[in-house]
Each structure stands twice: as C-alpha cells, then as structure tokens.
Image (cartoon, grey):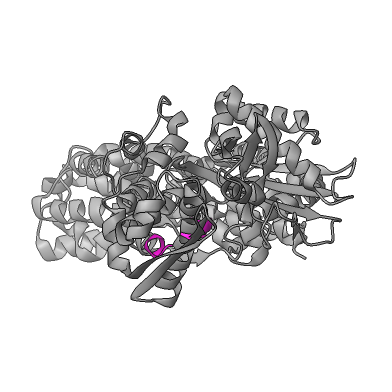
Amino acid sequence: MKTIGIDLGTANTYLYGRDSASAEPLPLILPRISDEKGCIATVVLYEDSKPLLIGNIAESEYYANRAAMPARTLRSQFKPEIAHADSGAMLWMTDFLRQLRAALPQGVLEPESRIYVGMPSGTREDFSLNLSRCFTQAGWPRPAFVRESDAAMISCLQSGVLDIDDLENRALILDFGGGTCDFTSLESMDVLQNGGDPLLGGRLFDDLLFQVFCRGDELFRRDAPGCGYEYYLHWIQCKAEKERFSDAVGLDGADGVSLHAVWHDARGNRRDAYVHNYTREDFIRDAENYVATDSLRAMLSQYADRGGLSPQARDLLQGRRIGLLSWFKSILAGIDGRRDMAKVILTGGSSRWFFVQDMVGELFPAARLAMSRRTYEDIAYGLALYPVLAESHAAARALLGEKIEAFAAQACEVARNIVAKHAAFAVRLCTERIVDRDIMPVLEEAQKARKTVEEVERAFVENIRNDTGLMAVIREKTEALREEIQYELQQRFRAWLRQNGVPLAPRFEFPARALSKDFFDAVSVKVSRLAFLNIMDFMASAVLPAIAAYAVAGAIAHTGEPVSAVLGGGAAFAGVWGLGKVAKGFLWKRRLPGFFLTESNRRKIVQKNKAYIEAALGKAFAEVQASLADDAERRLHRALEAMLSRLTVLNQVRCARP
C-alpha cells in the first residue's frame, strides 16, 4: 500500500492502509493477531526471553498453554516508557513492531510505502526519536509522526461529525482510550491547550469489573486471583463485559445488567461466574471508591518513580482509594475556556461511558456534543488520509503565496474605508457633544450674567478640556471600529481563501486591535487640543458682527441700555463693527450686552461654531486616517505573512473526502 497509518496505542494498535490518492483508507486485518475489526492488542509474548507472538493470539496463548507458562512472559503497557528510552520498553516495542511487520499480508508493505504514526498530545520530542529508532530497527521505513489530535480531527472532518465551520469557533477533541485520557482544545486550527492523564484509561475499569466479579461470585473470588488464567479473565473477559455493560447502560438505558465471565480450569472444566443486576448506581459507587488490584499496580509499576503525576495517579500507584469519575471530572475542569467551547468531539473506546457525556454536558454547557463514528479507529484512519492532504496543501500554499499581495491590497482598502466611516461618525458625535454640552450652556449663562468675551472663551476651553464624555464617545467608536474591521476582514478572508481552493480558513489575527488603539490615541490627542482651535476668534470676528448688524439697534431701543455702558462710548460703537478682525480685541474686556445672547442669537452662534468645529475636527481626523492607512498596510502584510507560515495541512481536508 502507498500509505499505512498506525495508531500505536498503549492497550491496542490499529492499522489503516490506502492504495492511492482516490481510495478510502481501509483497516488492515491480520489473521489471529487482530480481531475482525482490526484491533491488535499491544502485547508481546516471550518464551525463554525470545519474542514468540504478539497481539490477540499472544494473550490467548499465554492463557491457554499453562504448561509453558513458567518459561513465558507477557509484556504490555510499554508504549509510554519509550519517551524515557527505557531499555526494556525499547526492546519490547522493537520486537512488537518486527512481529507486526512480519504479519502483514504479502504486498501490503511496498518499497515506496509511507508510514505515518500518531504522536500523543504533550509528549516530549524524545518520544518520536526513540520510537523512530524502534521502527527502523524492526525493518520498517522511517515513519513520519503526526499529532494524534490532528489525525483524529481529519477523521472526524472526513466523516462529517466535525464540520469545517466548527473550527472557526473553539472545539475540543476528547480521546478517552484504553490507556490514557487526552484532550486537545482548538480554535481556528490553532491548538490552544493539550492535556490529560497517562494513567486514567479503560484498563482501570477492566480492573474494577474484575473486583466486582471477585466480590459478587464466590467461585470467581476463590479461583481467579493468582491463577494461571487470571490475565485472561482480568484483561480480556472483564474488558469485554465492561464494554457490554457500558453500552447497555449508556445506549440502551438498562437499569441493571447481568455480568457473565467464563473460563476453563486446569482440568479443562468450564467455569461460569455471574453478577446479576449490576446497575448504574452500583457502578458509580464502585468507581468512586476504587482501589487498584496488585495486578494492575504491578503492570503500572514503571510509573512509580516518574515525576509529573497527578495526585490521583500517585494515590492509584500507592494503593489508596480514589474516585475514578471524580478524576475524570477534574481533567475536564482543568480545560481553559470551558464556557466558550462550541463543540466537543468524543473519541476513544472509553468515551462511550454514560458518565463521560453527562460530565461534558455539565462542564461545557454551551457546547454541542458529538460522538465520533470511528471511536476506536479515528487516529489510524486520519493518519492514512494525512499524506493526500499534505500534497494538496503544498499546492494550495504555493497558490496563496503568489496571491497574498492581492488580498493585502484589498484588505488595506477595506480597512481604510472602515476607518474613514467611523472617523466621520466620530466627528459628528464629538461636534454635537461639544455644542450641546460645552458651548450652549456657557452662552446661556453669559446671557444671564453679562460675561466678557474673555470669560466666555475661557469657559469654552475649560468645558472642552474637562469633558470626559468626549473620550467615552471616542472609546465607543474605537470599539465599534475594531469589531467591524475584525468581522469584515475575516469574512473577506474566508471568501478569498475558498475562491483559491482553501475551504478551511486558518486562524488569522487581523491587526484590528492595534489599528483601533492607534485610532483612539491619535483622535484623543486631536480632541484634547480643541482648546487651541480659537473658537471665540471665529465667533467674535465672523458671528458677532453679523448678529449685531441686524439686532443691536432694535435691541437697544427696546432695552434702553446706554451704548456707552455696554461698549464704552458712542464713537466706539459707531465704528466697532467695521473693524472686523480687531473686533475681538475691542470686546475682550467688555461685558456682552444681554441682547447679544438671546435665544435666537445663541442658536446662530452655535450653528456657526458647529460648522467651524466640525470642519476643524474633520481636518484633524483626516490627518489621523492618512497616518493609519500606512500603518494598516504594514500591519496587514505582517499578519498575512505570519498566517501563511502557519498554514496547516488541515486546510485541505474537504478536498480529500472520498
């Protein structure tokens, strides 16, 4: 086959092969070594320290041939120790892979075959280096390693359980398998968090069911522990009953299930053990008061001296009582952004437990829950599909590299237009606020108190300077600007990618926040300097003379105010309005007559100043826009280049669907 994907699990191994780019991956069934679904027990049977058998037949032979048992050893659970280059684990893994290669049907492994192997979340680089050495020593081609979370995601996307649009939001892939519990949190193709526990897995529940049989059946309790067929009962029979019980209470909703184990004693007599009406409540009680058997602790003894274990794992290895369900819940509770999670995908055999779905629903209230259609085979299937995606990814990457400049130019133009729109809106809002809050009240007060021009202008300046609401207006428009740039450019980016053959948009951090911060800072400075716009210069030289020309004579006639009391003498009054530009200087220290600031005249003064302020702010904001346009172009180019460098193979997944 052209491609072979290997999910080398702690408890079980799965292989999927693919003949050509157009073919769908198919499971590799190895007679006697695997079951009918392709599941291969990750175990090696040794006789006199020489590897004899692997897989399911190794477990059966170890149990069946008691006469040879003293010379035989069954090795399992060695995969995690590869990361530490444990010499025993390296030997067992190499022997397992050598026997696995020998068991492949004729013609499956070709000279040009490419091997893809899953890499668990959060493992050290040493894991892949050491495992690669085991593969090559066993006669395999040097493998390529892909994160198991990526492989599971490819499988879920291909099957339709996970949709491309789901990845635009935050999603969680929870892999609860036979040996470990792993999770990967993603958003827009970026891995936000990896985690889990290397000791929490289905094997603990196998052990729990073994104890249930020991407690509930006298014959089992007397004969099974320590006998030659304990391994078979403990890890094969109890595993099968565990899965049947899990399906019954989870999928069928059964209140109680009768458990049954069967074996043959040393004389060949059949033995049967029963536990009747084992309920969901019984299981929860036992799981929350679990103490590992000596057999399980011996199997996991290599972990005892390792650092980084969770408190529950340490208690497990030391034979203390722990809560298995509480342990699982604590892992979920440690996932960041739980309330923002839009979708949770469950994969791995142990994810079928009823309590898994219950806890996910409780801790991820906003998430939609989906069960993978290939619960056990997701990783191997995704690995076999991976290279086809990698090839199309390379072509798409080259295409995007050629056209990225075109989108950058388009994006810059969009950003400039959005900034211009929000700047114009901000000018209008600021102008209206200045007029309503900072100018009109001063004029109303001046009409009553007969203030001088100097006092009126100083009041204008102080009001504008102390108007914190202006900054609130600008801050509100800044946030609206940021949101619109982010949304509009993201939508255009997705459409542009799809037009160029990339249906899944990667996470692209548009510099919207940086642009909006620049906008806020620049506009804030301009508004804070409105005190220097010489508002009263305009009012005194262009507004007051026009008002006085038609209002002064009638107003004086009706009020009877002496001109000399207002403007310092008739001669001055006769020529003041012809002075134009020097009118302000003439009025500076003189009190304005009440009739200058009537309601009608105040409206005219305000309208003139409103137009003046709006024009001045418009000019100031135009300068801000010009500066931002250059910055936006530079920032967008850098962001696009960074995105292109992070473009992943998963962007091509829909193209490869059979």
Could you tell whether 113 is left or right of 342 in the image? right
Q: Position of residue 383 (x, y in %)?
A: 70, 49
Magenta-highlighted stretch: main secondary structure?
A: helix
Q: Is residue 484 above or below residue 583?
A: below
Residue 49 image-quadrant placement:
top right
Q: Which stretch appears magenta?
A: 346-357
Residue toward you, 504 or 145: 145
Left or right: 530 with respect to 518? left
Side of 76 where 476 appears, left or right: left
| Position of residue 281 measured from the top left corner of the image (x, y, whole percent) | 28, 66
Say whether residue 530 is left or right of residue 489. Answer: left
**Rendering coords of residue 571 (x, y %):** 22, 44
Q: Residue at x 60, y 33 (%)?
A: 71
- Which residue is found at the position 37% from the left and 62% from the top? 355
Q: How many marks?
A: 0
Q: Is residue 351 magenta?
A: yes
Residue 122 colored in magenta in the image: no
591 and 489: which is toward the camera: 489
Q: Is residue 610 visible?
A: no
Is residue 480 in view from this perspective?
yes
